[in-house]
Amino acid sequence: MEFVGEEIDYTFVIQKTLVLLFCVALSWKMIIYMCNLLNIEKEPIRVLITGAAGNIGYAIAPMIARGYMLGPDQPMILHLLDIEPASTSLEAVKMELQDSAFPLLKGVIATTNVVEACTDVNIAILIGGFSRKVGMERKDVMSKNVVIYKAQASALENYAAEDCKILVVANPANTNALILKEFAPSIPEENITCLTRLDHNRALAQLADKLSVPVTSVKNVIIWGNHSSTQYPDINHAKVSTKSVDRPVKELVTDHNWLTSEFITEVQQRGAAVLRARKQSSALSAASAACDHIRDWFLGTPKGTWVSMGVCSDGSYGIPPGLVYSFPVICDKGSWKIVQGLSVDEFSREKMDDSARELAEEKALAYSSLNV
């Protein structure tokens, strides 16, 4: 028996295939268009920078405007605040930001009015403060800054967005953050933090240099305590990532004396070393660390990695509740959580307690300055 098949119409098949490919391509273009449309319509986040005419402010503003802090698809409006004598420089910063034509930057408000600066801001990066001058006692600097931060607390509480998140950079950072917490009671205490990420980054860099590895391969150092010379850079849980496995830093650094002496001192005194070399305090690295702090807080820390943040103690690791103290934290979707269950040896315990005592002394001094 003989079967005779129908003759295939190749022209028809090719036409159908071309139509299908066209439809697929058109659908893909529509998907891309809709994604871009969604990005364009994303609401701008309002970011306050105090002390914006200073060195750190000048460094951090373009980092934020480029998307380094909040991601490449998040528009923002920058609120720049400084004191009246710096108003001309502040206006120049605004002009340069405008001239840079950053696509994500949807507006710049430059002002010396604290109410205008704080109104509706979602993020506040507090860099402005009174710097210590030659011949001044620590208590003199403290007394001036606590007054500044008490006023700042009032402005943020009354005019900032309800969910405003605050990062204090100006020193004494931990105690300035404490004053904010105490005098802005309606702002959740978990929304008030201070910067110890700079010290964290310095520790990562020192270890990477010692081991001749990329800094991105080192993780989970801890900065405990105050952003001062009593801070404790802890490597007991730090690891170096290789292609196959994470290895403890303590296994890779054979010079254990370096880890317990020179390394700690190097991190503690790094700011002073920069000041001696530059004749000005750290600005670029502080700005970068502040961006790192906010980025991880908002976008989350990588899985298996923690960072150091100055946050309100809940009593974890025996640190008195209420102090603003640097802990290891993990972040997710705008919230942070102290890493629990880490072992603390006797050497670490002593260092951690020393820094806690200093913070308690600073708190008492700050309160006495305010007659609280």
Image: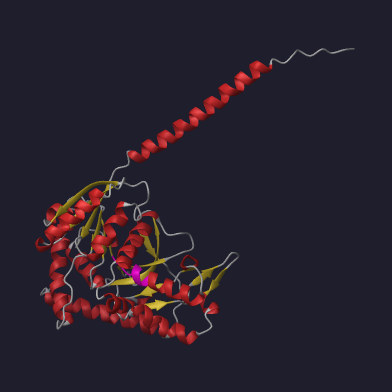
Determine the residue positioned at 29% across, 55% down.
62
Relative horizontal placement of residue 148, taking residue 173 as reference (left or right): left
In magenta stretch: residue 347: no
Residue 231 at x, y = what percent?
Answer: 33, 78
The foreground one among 235 and 12 is 12
On screen, residue 183 above or below 108: below
* Residue located at (36% from left, 41% from top): 39
Q: Is residue 255 left or right of residue 150?
A: right
What quarter of the picture does the C terminus occupy? Answer: bottom left
Viewer-proximal residue among 47 and 26: 26
In the rendered image, residue 287, in percent from the top left (x then y), is placed at: 30, 63
The quarter of the picture where the N terminus appears is top right
Q: Is residue 162 visible?
A: no
Task: Name the spot of residue 110 as percent of width and height, x first.
Answer: 16, 53
Span highlighted in magenta in the image: 194-200
Locate residue 104, reporting x and y percent: 31, 46
| Residue drawn at (28%, 45%) of the image | 44
Magenta stretch: includes residue 197: yes
Q: Is residue 349 above or below residue 100?
A: below
